[in-house]
Amino acid sequence: VLIAKAGDTALYSFYEFDWGDSWKSLLDLKPKYPKHLPIFNEANLRDEAKKNQAVIYLSKGNETHWLIPINSSWHSTLYDEFDPSNLGNKPLFYYLKYSNSFGIRDKILGLGALSIVSSTSDSYNIYSDRTAHYFFKYFDQPVGKALIEARNRNYELSQIMKNKNIYEKEYYDTILLGDPSISFDPNLHLEQSVNIKEENGNFAAEYSFDPSYKIIDYDSNSYIIFEDADDYFVDENKPIIPIYKKEFMLPADSELLGFSIKLSNKTYDNIELPIIPSDPDHFTNETFNGMFPEENYWNLEARLLDNRTIFTGLFSPIVYYSNNTAKIFERINISLKYKSPLEILEISAKDIKQGESEKIDLNLFSNLNQNKEAEIILKIQTDGFENISARKAEIKPGG
């Protein structure tokens, strides 16, 4: 983070320090003086950029140069031009937030960048982390996915903040150029395996989750914000709907027999509906009536080349009504029933330690009509470590 000093000295001096550890030290009753952040000048800009493959630039610039403050007074700030070609390295990704930063795209891409997030119009408000929060929250995912999260979040927040034009504008103005698939900090999401039961030779997989949400009261209005949605569904003249996505991998040669969900719900009154007015040049604004969505889950199946099946469920945790009532599904229970020649019911691996002989138990159920020899391959992977073990085993019909 590089800080440019201008205007109110006291205010900007406050932002020139890293208060993260200091707040914690105050809570621990062991106060520490905050560390001063690097001053925004050419030397520090070069030094910070050469350490990273991603550059986040939230200052001033034009179609050819960035502007670095060299002298500040109470009323004005003087700037030097800096050509980003002189950074000394070739970052792969740029996040550029200043008026019409889209204009410098050819120069940045010519330097070898693979992706750029930029603005296509003027920045009317002093930039803050509010509109970019979700982009950097999801920066452990591909940049295209992170930008979608940020755009959807800004779209929703434009309904609940006093200066909603900031969020609407960010939704339309911020674009991605280049490769949307690059990722700099991939995050391994560890999840508990789905509970699978054998029932008269068939199998049942059960899973439940609780969507996380908050009720926010602002300016005599109440709004509902979902904090962990996977995506958002946007339709003209309808409320914005958060979507949760759950995938189940079924074994090869399996057949889906049934799918059902159970819902636990709670109703709230006097809720503001998150409806963004349509662009009048392209759409006709209409009054929302009734309920939306009319269905709260959708599912699809896809057969893979190795004959396994991916079952995908999409779930809306909320239904909005035009009388400003909202029904929230606080718990969603999902049940799949299917048949398969073979299934792993349980894997027991407790207190496994690297470098020691350990025991891992597999509980299988076979619908095969005779004994079969199989090769069981186990892959254990952590940061900096990977181990693959293979064993021959004879599998008999039944459990």
Image (spheres, helix red, strand yellow):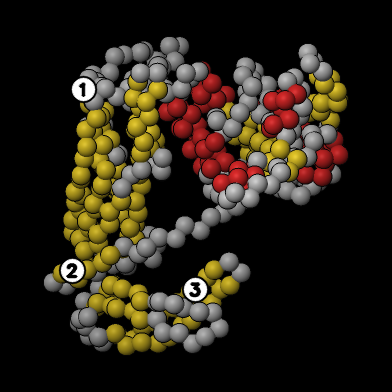
Q: Secondary structure at mark 2?
A: strand
The residue tagged 3 is 380
Mark toward the start of the polypeptide (2 vs 1): 2
The CA span between labels 2 and 1 is 41 Å
In percent of the image, x 35 and y 13: which residue is there?
A: 285
Instruction: Tell which of 87 and 313 is nearer to you.
Output: 87
Where on the picture, by quarter, is residue 394?
Answer: bottom left
Q: Earlier in the sequence, mark 3 or mark 2?
A: 2
Where residue 43 appears, x then y in whole percent? 86, 39
| Residue plotted at (28% across, 72% down) | 345
Query: Which residue corresponds to the image point at 50% horizontal and 79% vertical from the top-left?
Result: 353
- Circle 3 Cα neighbour tier, 10 Å, few/some/many (<14 / 14–19 / ≥20): few
Tell me: residue 366, above or below residue 40: below
- Residue designated by label 1: 290
Residue at numbered disc 2: 202
- Identify the element where label 1 is drawn: loop
Q: Is residue 273 visible?
A: no
Query: What residue type is disc 2 on?
Result: Asn
Is 271 located above or below residue 93 in the figure? above
Q: How many marks?
A: 3
Q: Residue 204: name its quadrant.
A: bottom left
